[in-house]
Image (cartoon, rainbow, N blue to C red):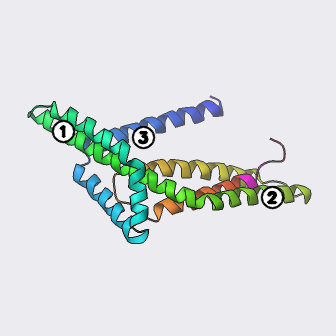
């Protein structure tokens, strides 16, 4: 088996595992847990970033959430009162709350990304110039550090998706930490690009 096929099979395995975990989370996590996570994160943003930041984050997702809540209320209204249908009503409510939490976190991350763009650009440009200086100084690029940068970028990307989907409260430092780690991974990647690709 070639290395690419082996990596593809591992990727498919982890994608299937992630889908199973996501479905199990949807089926079994109580709505109260998601509601507490959403309220906790709103309180943190209000306490640290202020009302204007919280209002901006909410304004980014207000239209999407209103449409989702209306559609969920219509679907829940069609269900009866049997045990399965009550469970489905609870899952519909939990789905709307979870979507609200994901949208709130995505808007919060967008806010930090807008503030962190200068850092990300500076890290990328600095990494590029470090590479150019090494080329003229006849210092060989490190394929190991380049691979570390690529893997670190992938790890940060996956961690960002997990952060957005996690139905538990996260500290407010998570979103700015993602921006900083993106900048570090891009610096590692750019600074250690090979001379010939």
Q: First in sequence: mark 2 or mark 3?
A: 3
Residue sitting at 49 percent across and 51 percent down?
160
Q: Nearer the viewer, mark 2 or mark 3?
A: 2
The residue singled out by tag 3 in the image is: 18
CA neighbours of label 2 inside 10 A, class few (<14), some (14 to 19), many (20+): some
Residue ranking furthest to the bottom: 47
The kind of secondary structure element at disc 2 is helix
Q: CA distance from mark 2 to mark 3?
A: 38 Å
Mark 3 or mark 1: which is in front? Answer: 1
Residue stretch rendered in magenta on the structure: 190-194
Q: Residue 20 sits in which quadrant?
A: top left
The image shows residue 143 at horizontal and vertical percentages of 75, 50
Tell which circle, 1 or 2, labels the residue nearer the N-terminal end: 1
Q: Nearer the viewer, residue 137 or 32?
A: 32
Is residue 89 a member of the stretch shown in magenta? no
Which image quadrant is residue 185 in?
bottom right
Residue at the image point whose x is 91% and y is 60% from the top:
137
Residue 129, numbered label? 2
Kindly indicate the quadrant of the structure image that contains residue 172: bottom left
| Nearer to us in this view, 181 or 2 | 181
Q: Which residue bears the numbered disc 1?
A: 89
Q: Earlier in the sequence, mark 3 or mark 1?
A: 3
Residue 65: image location, x then y, percent: 33, 44
Q: Marks 1 and 2, how far apart in space? A: 56 Å
Q: Is residue 191 magenta?
A: yes
Kindly indicate whether the residue at mark 3 contacts the one at mark 2 (C-beta within 8 angstroms).
no
Drawn side of residue 73 relative to residue 23, left or right:
left
Q: Main secondary structure of the magenta part?
A: loop
Number of residues whose C-alpha sits closer than 10 Å to that of mark 3, classed few (under 14), some (14–19) or many (20 or more) = few
Residue 63, visible in the rendered structure = yes
Mark 3 lies on a secondary structure that is helix
What crowding class fits label 1: few (fewer than 14 Cα within 10 Å), some (14-19), or many (20 or more)? many
């Amino acid at each position: 088996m070639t290395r690419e096929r082996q990596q593809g099979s591992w990727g498919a395995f982890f994608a299937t595992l992630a889908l199973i975990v996501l479905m199990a989370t949807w089926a079994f996590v109580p709505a109260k847990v998601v509601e507490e996570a959403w309220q906790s994160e709103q309180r943190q943003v209000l306490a640290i970033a202020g009302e204007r930041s919280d209002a901006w984050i909410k304004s980014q997702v207000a239209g999407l959430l209103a449409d989702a809540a209306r559609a969920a209320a219509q679907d829940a209204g069609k269900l009866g009162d049997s045990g399965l249908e009550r469970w489905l009503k609870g899952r519909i409510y939990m789905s709307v709350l979870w979507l609200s939490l994901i949208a709130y976190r995505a808007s919060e991350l967008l806010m930090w990304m807008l503030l962190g763009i200068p850092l990300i650009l500076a890290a990328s440009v600095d990494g590029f110039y470090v590479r150019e200086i090494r080329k003229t100084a006849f210092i060989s690029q490190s394929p190991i550090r380049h691979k570390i940068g690529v893997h670190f970028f992938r790890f940060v990307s996956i961690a960002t998706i997990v952060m957005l989907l996690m139905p538990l409260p996260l500290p407010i430092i998570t979103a700015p930490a993602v921006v900083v780690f993106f900048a570090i991974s891009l610096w590692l990647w750019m600074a250690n690009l090979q001379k010939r690709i």
